[in-house]
Amino acid sequence: MDIKDIIKPENLVYTKTKLMTDNALSYCPGCGHGTAHRLTMEVIEEMGVEADTIGVAPVGCSVLAYDFMNVDMQQAAHGRAPALATAISRTWPDKYVFTYQGDGDLAAIGTAETIHACNRGENIVIIFVNNGIYGMTGGQMAPTTLPGMPSSTSPYGRDTAKMGFPLKMTELIANLPGVYSVTRQAVHTPKHVRKAKKAIRQAFENTRLKRGLSFVEIVSNCNSGWKMTPNQANEWLEENMLSFYELGDIKVEGQLVKK
Amino acid sequence: MAKIKGAIVVDIEKCKGCEVCVPACPSDVIGMSKEVNGKGYHYAYMANPDACTGCSNCAIVCPDGVISVYKVKMD
Ligand SMILES: Cc1ncc(C[n+]2csc(CCOP(=O)(O)OP(=O)(O)O)c2C)c(N)n1
Ligand code: SF4
Ligand code: SF4
Ligand code: SF4
C-alpha cells in the first residue's frame, strides 16, 4: 500500500491535541516539559472540561505554560501557584483548577505554599515536574538534586554532608491528611507516558468528585542542565533518578499505599 | 489475516531534532534527516516506512507533539 493512501484524514490515529496551541514550545529539544503539558491537555480534552479548567503557571522554564496550554491560565509569583490555585478554586468551586510547577518552584521557594495547600486539602491538582535541578536559571542545585549529582553550584556532585539531603516532597505531603491522592510518574518512554496520562486523568476525576488535593509528580529530564543529549538524559534518568524517586502510587483514595 | 500498516507525518519546521522518538519506535522506522529545517535542526523522518505499524509510540513521547500518526487495516 502506498504511503499516500495511508496518510488520509480518516486514518488519523494520533495528532497533537487542539488544547495545545500552535506556538512553538520554548523548551530545549527533548525536554519533558512539553510531554507533560500535552498529557495534561489531552486529559482535559478527553474529559471535555476545557471551558471549566483554569491552570496556574509557575516561575521556571514553564513560566510561559499559558502560551502553550489552550485553557484559561494565570501565572503566579515564584512558588505561589498553590496559593493562587486555592483562591481560584474557592472562588469557583466547580472549576478544574491545577498548578504546573517545577521542583525549584514547588520544593524550594514554594515549600510553604505547597505544604499548606496540601494540608488544607484544596480541591486542586498539582502537577509537579521534577528534573532535579533549577533548569531556567542555569542548572543550579535544587532541593531535589540527587546525592552525588553534579549541578552548576555543586560541580563535584551534591555532597550531602555539606549540602544536605534531597527532599522527597511527594512522600512528605502524602502523609498529610488533607491530601487525597499522590502518585509519581515519568514521561521519557511510551510506556511511562501512557501510565502518566492515566494518573493525570485520575487526578482530574478526583477534582470532578471534589475529593480534595491530587498530587502528580512527573520525574523528568533537564538535558541542558545535566549537560547531556536528550536520549542520554533519559537513560540517566532511568538509571539514577528512578531508584531514588520510585515510580508508582503513594496514596490512593486517601490511603497510603506505599511508605 | 488482517495486516496493520502505519505512517507518520512529522511537522518538519517544528521538529527540534531531539531524537527522543528514535529509540521509542519498536520497528526502527525513524531516522534523522541529513538536511536541516529552518531552525537548523536535523528533523525526524520515516527512514524505513514499510515497518511502521502506526503504534503511536513516537508521537506520544515527542516533547513537541510534532508527529501525527495514520493507520489502516488491510485484509
Ligand atoms: C522570587 C524569585 N526568586 C528567584 C527567581 C529566579 N528563578 C527563576 S526560575 C528559578 C528556578 C526554577 O527551577 P524549577 O522550578 O526546578 O523549574 P525548571 O526551570 O527546572 O523547569 C529561579 C530560582 C525568581 N524568578 N523569582
Ligand atoms: S533548561 Fe532544562 S527544564 Fe528548561 S527547557 Fe531546557 S531542558 Fe527543559
Ligand atoms: S507509529 Fe510506531 S511504528 Fe510507526 S514510526 Fe511511530 S513508533 Fe514507529
Ligand atoms: S521527538 Fe519530536 S521533536 Fe524530537 S526528533 Fe522526534 S519528531 Fe522531532
Image (cartoon, helix red, strand yellow):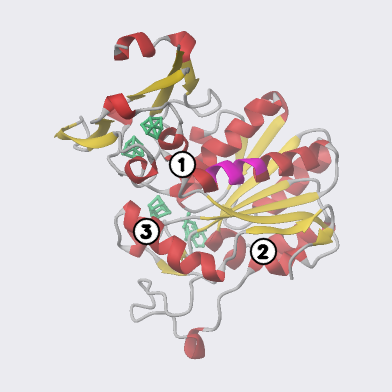
Q: Which residue is mark 1?
A: A34
Residue situated in front as seen by the camera: B70 or A89: B70
Residue situated in front as seen by the camera: A27 or A182: A182
Q: Which of disc 3 and disc 2 is earlier in sequence? A: 2
Q: Which residue is mark 3?
A: A233
Gap in Å between the C-alphas at discs 1 and 2?
Answer: 22 Å
- In the drawing, does residue A30 fall left or right of residue A252? left
Quadrant of res A209: top right
Asked if ligand 2 lies within 8 A of label 3, the reply is yes
Q: Give the vertical position of B75 relative to A27 (above or below).
A: above
Q: Which residues are magenta?
A: A193-198
From the image, state whether disc 3 or disc 1 is nearer to you: 3
Q: Secondary structure at mark 3?
A: helix
Q: Secondary structure at mark 2?
A: helix
Farthest bottom residue in view: A161
Quadrant of res B61: top left
Q: Amino acid at mark 2?
A: Thr
Q: Which residue is mark 2?
A: A170
